[in-house]
Amino acid sequence: MSSSARDRWQPSVEPLLDLVIAHNDDSMLREIADADYGMDSEAHYAAIQGLIKSRDFSARMKWEPSEVLELIRWSEPEDSTWKPGSTGTCGHWMRLFACVMLLRAGAEAENRDRLSGEDSTVIQLVASSMKLGVEATGAALGFLHWRLQQEQGGWLTPYIVLGLLLLAVSSADYDQALLSDLLPKLDSEFCSSEDLLRFCTKQDAWRSMLRFVILENPNMELNFVKERVAPILDVSDG
């Protein structure tokens, strides 16, 4: 792994936060704020702008803007029929923005275990990052590595590890020692490997991406990762 790649693995919030703020213009932020059928859109918009300007996530995230951020988190930019949310590149930047804001807020004590569906938020963040290219993927690596440190073995830890594995393998931004260090963190006291995805709303997205990026990867050096990931996918029943 090169020194520049190693830098991308350093825990860091700001690069990804800077990136999503830079790529979401006012019309996109307005669309996010309108996501709840336009209800309380001005309050949602003001709250989003407040987070952007202050970058202060220490307070409990209120309904404005958590409701619209969570709705955009569920969006599917590759599906032209999905609402709310945009399609294509703009849709991915909007979804990535929502996921970053939610996962950043979720690291704070005031929001710990309060924001819903963070296991799904991780895969949505990973999927959009990979769609948006090398810069987004690299920034997402640092961001998830930072959130991993905040978790300290909490219930979200294995999902963050799976997200890091996907980002690293898809971009070939890793070495074997680094992946070996991550794998033990997939063990969770909260549920077994086989149950890890069973109750996740976005379990299909997790399964599809883990199969495509890791299990079907022809790189033989990744066999030790494949062996660890296979039970999580419950391949024998698939």
Image (cartoon, helix red, strand yellow):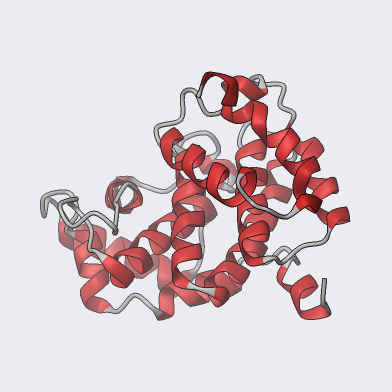
Residue drawn at 42 percent across, 71 percent down: 52
| Image quarter (top left, top right, bottom left or bottom right) of the N terminus | bottom right
* Left or right, 114 with reference to 135: left
Query: In front here: 85 or 226?
Result: 226
Residue 190: horizontal and vertical position, in percent? 65, 21
Residue 163: horizontal and vertical position, in percent? 60, 49
Identify whether 30 is placed above or below 213. below
Number of dots carrying numbers:
0
Question: Image quadrant of residue 8?
Answer: bottom right
Residue 92: horizontal and vertical position, in percent? 36, 64
Residue 109: horizontal and vertical position, in percent? 59, 42
Looking at the image, can residue 59 be seen? no
* Left or right, 97 with reference to 233: left
Residue drawn at 20 percent across, 68 percent down: 30
Identify whether 146 is placed above or below 191. below
Residue drawn at 42 percent across, 75 percent down: 21
Looking at the image, can residue 5 be seen? yes
